[in-house]
Image (spheres, coloured by chain):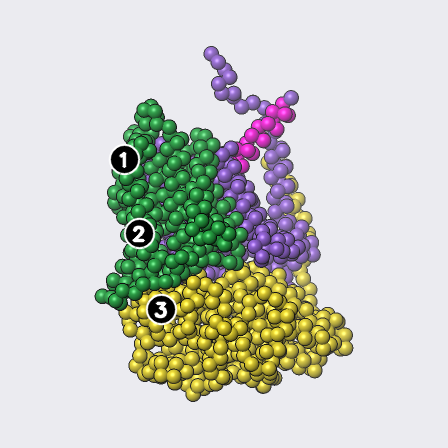
Amino acid sequence: MDTFIQLVVNGLGKGAVYALLALGFVVVFKATEVVNFAVGSLVLFGGYLVYVLRDVIGWYGAAAVGIVGAALVGLFIERLCAAARGADQNSLALLTIGVDVIITEEIVRRVGAAIPFIGDPFDARPILIGNVAIFRTQAIALVVGLVLITAFFLAFRYTDWGVAMRAQAENREAAALMGIRSSRVTATAWLIAGALAGVAVLFMATQDFSGAGLGRGTHAIALIAFPAAIIGGLDSTAGAVVGGIIVGLTESLSAQYISFDFSKSAVFLVMLVVLVVRPSGLFGTKELSRV
Amino acid sequence: MIRGRSKAIAAGALALVLAACGSTADTGAGATGAGGIKTDKGVTDTTISLGIMGDTSGVFKNLGAAINAGNQLWVDDVNAKGGICNRQLKLEVVDHGYKADTAKTLYPQLEPKVLGIVQLLGSPVLAALKQNLIDDNMTAAPASWSSQILNNPNIMMIGTTYDLEIVNGMAYLQQQGLIKDGDTVGHIYIDGEYGGNGLLGSKYYAGVHKLNVKEAKITSTDNDLTNIVTGFKGDGVKAIVLTTTPGQSASALAANQALGLNVPVLGNNPTFDPALLKTPAAGALGNLYVAASSAPFSSETPKAAEIAAAYKAKYPGSPLNGGVDVGYVEGLVWQSVLTKACENKDLSRPGVQTALKSLTSVKTDDLVATLDYSSPGSPPTRGVYIAKVDAKAEGGLTEVAPLFTAPDAAGYKAPFQK
Amino acid sequence: MSDTLTKAPPQAPTRPWAKIIGTAVLLVVLVLLPVLVGSHVAYLKLAQYVLIGAVGGIGLTLIVGQAGQLSLAHPFFLLLGAVSYAVLAGDPAETPDLVSLHWPPMLAVIGAVIICGLVGLAFAPVAGRVRGIYLGVASLSLVFLGLWLGQSLGILTGGTGSGRPPPTFSLFGFPFSNTTPAPTIAGVAIQKQQRLWYLFLAFAVLAYVLARGAVRGRIGRAWRAVRDNEAAAAAMGVSVARIKAGAFTISSAYAGLAGVMTALWLDLVKPDENEFTGNYSLTVSIAFLAIVIIGGLGSVPGAVVGAMVVYGLQQFFLLGANEFGWFAGAQFGGLSAVILAAFIYGLAVVLVVLFEPGGAAAIGRRLAASLSRKEQR
């Protein structure tokens, strides 16, 4: 039973970080219907800034710069998408793939052999409660995640921006007619996605979370945003959070109760099943196609 | 008409090709060089070229860099004393990053330039190139110690194999009272020749001492082993055995401590890298015991100290780990082989083979135990050193048990042993 | 009425002899490549690698460009093709611990292609449930399925450490490996790499011709109908489900053939250790997508051009690194061959989407049109 509890704790802790990534993913999709394949490079860019700046302006300063930097890269990608006039959603997704390749290769090259761990203030200092260990990185991620997600939902419900975003997601043309500046909504969405990625990487490139520093592996972990978002429903922000948690739990429980090999692929196989059985995910809205 | 033209062109090309066809005459075997000595690829009148297929960019890059340096230090020493067979030694270096497919691509480019391979790092690489080595009659000294490869006549194993490292290591743990008959132990191992061979050792020892082994198979690039160690804790393991990369060892050790398990951890020689002492996991490494056939970097064996000093002088800032001794030993074994081949007046690849099989006690100034190559299929030696992690020692390891061979290890029959 | 809305293509007297001569010269060069290359066999291996990319790329462009079904699953079928070939043609004497059925190699290749086609067919119903980018994401999970099965079915795949050796290809007793004596053409020995070149060339030409035929024929029209408007296609009597199934079958068969070629090229069949580096990884998924985008979605000759850019450049730089010492600083965080190649094709993808969505095919068409316009004057 202890093992089960520990695995749940392990899974929830990672789930909080996955939820942040998935949320960014969904925000972009809601605003633009573009699937962001560049989530990995947003993560890497933010992490890279922390790596090079932490000795210069301290970890907290570097983390702040990393978050802002990742947000700006998100904005840059949004500008590229806007420049691709008349390109449909598929083409824009492919565009994000191209950008992802370039940014990822450059950062992996710069980080090179170092593969640095960047969670200095909280990494590798676990808290033991009875027979259950709580990894500090994951615990802080959980708290930070809760704060950010709550703030996001409040903004989504009660601010002008939130209303504009929901209106655009519902019906882009009508929203434009009502005076909502589509480009501003889109830009904000990508900024948020970048910022969330910048926050997530602080917890991802640590001993506690992934056992590896910033590198190609971190980029691969960021892809978990896909199944998390799909399971929750690509256009549901609440779904993203739930999806992230489900993904974390699936990973840790399947590692023990099925096999370690399987746990690495389990999440994507679950995503496939969800896509086939309920394409709009747990909380997403069903797509209707009119002839 | 147009079609007819293209047909004519195609026919013309075909005729050209057919007219140009022929067959190769059988080319003779190796030529004869200066001093009436038979030579081969990689041997000229003034040089002997040996190849390195190492890892300086992959998961064992720190170890690999040190081994390369060890090879070079040996070459420098030999050349300073006049070379071998009146020829100077030369190294051709390639880096495969511990990837079997990269190695497969690089090998055909290296092969024509060298007589033999002084370092072939990586059990998966070795296994993937096994047939190539046999086809080209290329002798190689591997920087990998799987007994699974001992049925390849082209290998000169330079120390104790992984299975024996584990058997000796577990015997040591039991002797220290850290495990006893009937306990459960967990073994995390990398899929393939390296991990699989380590597992042979733990399963053999478990059979003899009625231990229960919980296996966990991973790949060389898995990074987070927390969930595996969580499962081990639930199984009530009294020790964890690792046949993994250094990064993975750190993850297992960190989890071992974080979860409050705190059992002794036994690792094969490649499982530790002093660079781990600079990572967040540094505080958790105290539980690790490393079983290796070569002495740790900080060893006070005279030859080891001499090499350490030369290494620090020539490669300041390079990673300090036992790899430099491994590289030097590879060189020393090759030296014995080439010297013998020179005496036989046969520096061809078959000549190298003949020389190798005639060596029954190759001495390496106590860097490793005396090696016996006269029984192909058997590990040439069975002793190990045990070391523990020590942040204050150079190379991060301090010897806690000198070279020994446990009785269980003496009785172990390796897969291809006759 | 305005007649400048759409300019009709200039009705130039067609001068096909330029095209015929061009094709003939190309064929001669391809056939004589081993002679032209001589002892620099590394260039031959580069050319073989481009052909692998071309065969896989043609398969992907058919399904993504012609049939409009986004698929990221190509690496899964490459792995399946390579492992199937090894299992079907394997010699139990050489690999006693692994499943080996010792079929004749050519039969094993055909078997591998058929197996991949059937598995692709099995995945096709997913395309019925899931559309557009969702389908792309769904196909991504096949790569992970391949990762898991590759790691756990060690007795078929040989395991992720060192895999298993691919059985030597031979046709009617003629082995595609080094022999003494060996036939020569113009004094150049036709050994393993040269023989593999001709084998790959035969596969690639067959793949090209079949694809061209499909695109120009009824099946191509049906694909494009489904791509452009499924509902309308259904209304016109096209069986959408069957068309999608056909597209998946064919594209995965192509990928399977590319997988067999990969096994022969690499001289190794080995599943990957993780999902991001290796011969069957997401990186390869993206490389193939890049081939198809750069070449122009749906264009078969475009896929060949795309393969030259994506696969060719990568090998070309690697060759430079090994033979001429380019990128010597790579170990210390400098630019390496693989990274430079990735930059170039990543940039190419971005530029194509931004400025010329039709890719190399569109550029080629415009060049051809402007050339024939010049001739008219």
Chain drawn green, letter? A
Magenta stretch encompasses residue C360? yes
Label 1: state its secondary structure: helix
Chain drawn yellow, letter? B
Asked whether the residues under marks 1 and 2 belong to the same chain, the reply is yes
| Residue pointed to by mark 1 | A158
Q: Position of residue C342 (x, y in %)?
A: 53, 47
Chain bearing mark 1: A
Does residue B367 appear in this view? yes
Q: Quadrant of residue C332?
A: bottom right
Does residue C207 appear in this view? no
Query: First in sequence: mark 1 or mark 2?
Result: 2
| Residue pointed to by mark 2 | A143
Q: Is residue C370 above or below residue B100?
A: above
Q: Residues within 10 Å of mark 1 (few under 14, many from 20)?
A: few
Q: CA distance from mark 1 to mark 3?
A: 46 Å
Q: Residues within 10 Å of mark 3 (few under 14, many from 20)?
A: many
Chain drawn purple, letter? C
Q: Position of residue C42 (x, y in %)?
A: 62, 55
Chain bearing mark 2: A
Magenta stretch encompasses residue B278? no
Asked whether the residues under marks 1 and 3 belong to the same chain, the reply is no
- Name the residue type under label 1: Tyr
Q: Is residue A195 above or below residue C104?
A: above
| Residue pointed to by mark 3 | B257
Number of numbered discs overlaid on the protein picture:
3
